[in-house]
Amino acid sequence: MEEEYIKLIFGLKLKQIRSDKNLSLYGLSKLTGLSKSYLNEIEKGKKYPKTDKIALLSEKLDIPYDYLVSLKLDKNLAPIGELLQSKVLKEIPFDLFGIKESDLIDIVADAPVKVTAFISTIIEIAKHYNFGKENFYLAAVRSHQEANNNYFDDLEEKVIKFAGAYQIDLKQPVTSRELEEILIEEYNYTINNKELDKHNELDSLRSVFIPKNKTLLLASHTDDAQKAFIYAKEIAYNYLNITDRLYTFSWIKFDNFDPVLNNFYASYFAGALILPRETFSGQIKHLFDKDKFDKNLFLKTIESYNASPESFYQRLTNILPKDFNIQNLFFLRFAYKKGSDKFTLTKELHLTHHHSPHGNETNEKYCRRWISLKVLQEISENKSEQNHIFDVQVSHYPEDNVSYLIFSSATKDPFKNNQYRSISVGLEINRQLKRKIAFLNDEKIQIKEVGVTCERCAITDCKERKAPPLIIEGDIKNRKTEEVVLELNKKFG
């Protein structure tokens, strides 16, 4: 048991006993003869009293000595004990957000009952929504991205240094072949394109890395862009000297936070290598400077890189905040099975604040006017067998009085039959965006009034509605009930 944990448990117990006996710190100091500052340090978990001091506290507070030194907590403090004993606080990267663990301990020590109630509530919510530690770690990474506007200058610089050291021309599309050569020649990798196909259980995996002999197993149906990304991630792990890592792509499970964070860093490095900042930023500026939106040019820009549309959109979320000062944006990835009426949000990112289009975990129907869903329906129904459906839309949310310019692409899921995914980046329309994008007033860009979910949408003439506005109707009913109650209070009060 860690010393810090033992100190904190003793301090929490002492504070609870003092509060139960209606004693102030000053009062406990007078009662025991111990200084107020010393007692305060004990209660905050910063000091652990010697045996004679514990005996004194036991005598004056009329509490058994064994109870004071025991690590067992009563039901009011038990959730805090479980949290501390699980060492989850050690796994949360507080330093990424400028928080010291000691600050958190101070909060726990200052208001143990409130913190206990909060922790218990979080546990109940987690159980209700099947929220596991994987979700928690991924949420922590996402918060780290949002806190840094999803741009990491040190990784960008390392990509440039790597390209210089290995003579990779960042002005030309990076091929999987040149990255594979680096893995084999420099890092002694063995590439195997056959083994994964022998195991039906692994049909959803693109790659598996065997660290013992540095063998990288690849799914044979992985295209060149996917290979390039996987190779670039492997290079990142080696070039950045990352050892605590995930070994499958996509991930199966992880037991602590570091591999999740390192997976993000490796993915960022890979994206920055395949879609280099200087070239990428210049192409986006060229697109934004046009008076009319050039759809063909946008698609050609995506195709100019050896990257998937998802990688391209992810890269937009790095470059737009940094090079264009467009910081109010969101990223959404949806999954959809042909013939289904359900759209699943599998990934989202919000920069500067939580934007109107966002995830909803209560099984409500996402607004069918969203361009993200429209392109998914189109690609699942298209008879020309196009691999990529793209569209652009201005979405206006009347409830929040905010509008977004949204780019959205839908592609087939290469690993699942009759399944598709869409990637969208939305930019909040404000004065800043109007100065940056010349084609915002292009009349050919469709403008749609949208909601978040049907159940919460007040738009009355929506032909795409999939469920009645139950939440809105409930709110209206509650407001009317409150008004009648107020009138009755005035009448009889």
Image (cartoon, rainbow, N blue to C red):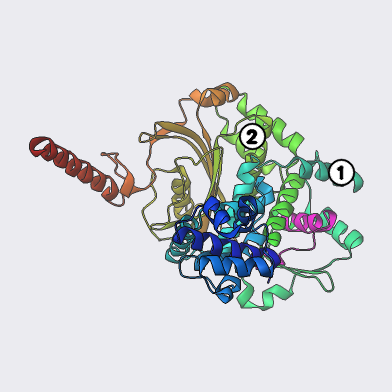
Q: Which residue is mark 1?
A: 161
Q: Could you tell me residue 337's position as x and y percent?
A: 46, 61
Question: Which residue is painted at 43% across and 43% down in the image?
Answer: 370
Q: Using a 10 Å C-alpha cutoff, classify the residue at mark 1 as few (fewer than 14 neighbours), some (14 to 19) or many (20 or more).
A: few
User: Looking at the image, which residue is at 60% across and 24% down?
Assistant: 436
Element type at mark 1 = helix
**The one of 254 and 299 positioned closer to us in this rendering:** 254
Residue 17 seen in render? yes
Q: Which residues are magenta?
A: 228-255
Magenta highlight on residue 230 = yes
Q: Which mark is residue 128?
A: none
Splitting the image into 4 quarters, where does residue 215 fall?
Answer: bottom right
**x and y percentages locating residue 108 in the rendered image:** 55, 56
Residue 321, numbered circle: 2
Q: Amino acid at mark 1?
A: Lys
- In the rendered image, residue 267, in percent from the top left (x then y), is placed at 71, 53
Horizontal side of 184 relative to 7 (left or right) equals right
Camera-nearest residue between 352 and 268: 352
Mark 1 and mark 2: Cα distance apart in space: 23 Å
Disc 2 residue crowd, few under 14, some 14–19, many 20+, Cα 10 Å: some
